[in-house]
Amino acid sequence: MSNNNISGSTPIISCSNLCKTYRPGWFGAKEVKHVLTGINLEIREGESVALVGESGSGKSTLGRQLLGFETPSAGEVRFMGNPLGQLDANGIKEFRRNVQVVFQDSIGAVDPRFRIGRVIDEPLRHLTDLPENVRRDRIADLLQMVSLHPHDAGKLPVQMSGGQLQRVCIARALASNPKLIVLDEAVSNLDLTLQIQVLDLLTDLRKRLGVAYLFITHDLRLVQRFCDRLAVLEGGKLVEEARVEHGQIHLQHPMSRNLQEAILPARPTPRHKSASAPA
């Protein structure tokens, strides 16, 4: 998948020479731990970028830095060219409205006491000035946008399947009409069929709305289907960047090749019996 109209646009989010170090005691660290070192990355309007690496490579930590959930130890994150650490209250609200996230655990990401309509309404209430009746219509539209029914607004999370609840989380992320959604292992808890359905939905939404994605994953098979380019992390360092061209990725770094060689085909090719093989 490729988007050739984005190279000249201002990055929605970018980081330069970003480093993150945890002191002893943080996240169970027993000594100073350098999690990210010298990361340079940018995501532009309308593109889908994968952040790929094995467990412990630092990809989710980088996602937290880009979302503003944590402060970098060195370097900086920029939103639309402006340093995140220098934004005033209005700038931070604008950042929150335009950069949303969908997490891996859809069950843990919603309050079980809230009905689905209220779950989706949270960013509308806090990040927009829309009156209640307009928000109600927006919630109905968002549910339909993710292939759910407006009547689902009255359900509790426990009444939804895992795939349906992840669609609710996508609807919530879309509510404030963001420029970028960070998808942090957002489909890894779903089976392959549901993964493909959700990624196809996200692809359609990208075409319709122009939203950009940062797709954090370890699965290159999904990257080939969903993304324009990818960045590979190993040991907290960005070791390779590559484009996805016609569903193919040409990787050079040994770590990247290891990830690529670990891919199992979604539909294994049947073995053909040779003429001499027994029946």
Image (spheres, grey):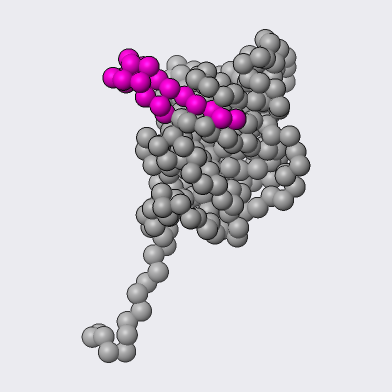
Q: Which residues are magenta?
A: 16-35
Q: Nearer the viewer, residue 114 or 84?
A: 84
Relative to 182, residue 74 above or below: above
Q: Is residue 173 left or right of residue 233?
A: right
Q: Is residue 157 left or right of residue 138?
A: left
Relative to 158, residue 87 above or below: above
Residue sitting at x 32%, y 15%: 25
The answer to whether one can see residue 161 in this image is: no
Q: Nearer the viewer, residue 249 or 210?
A: 249
Q: Quadrant of residue 180?
A: top right
Q: Nearer the viewer, residue 179 or 209?
A: 179
The image position of residue 77, as x and y in percent, is: 60, 25
The image position of residue 181, as x and y in percent, is: 59, 33
Position of the C terminus by quadrant: bottom left
The image position of residue 259, as x and y in percent, is: 41, 51
Relative to 262, residue 54 above or below: above
Q: Is residue 248 left or right of residue 189?
A: right
Instruction: Check if residue 79 falls in the magenta segment.
Output: no
Q: Nearer the viewer, residue 52 or 194?
A: 52
Q: Is residue 212 left or right of residue 189?
A: right
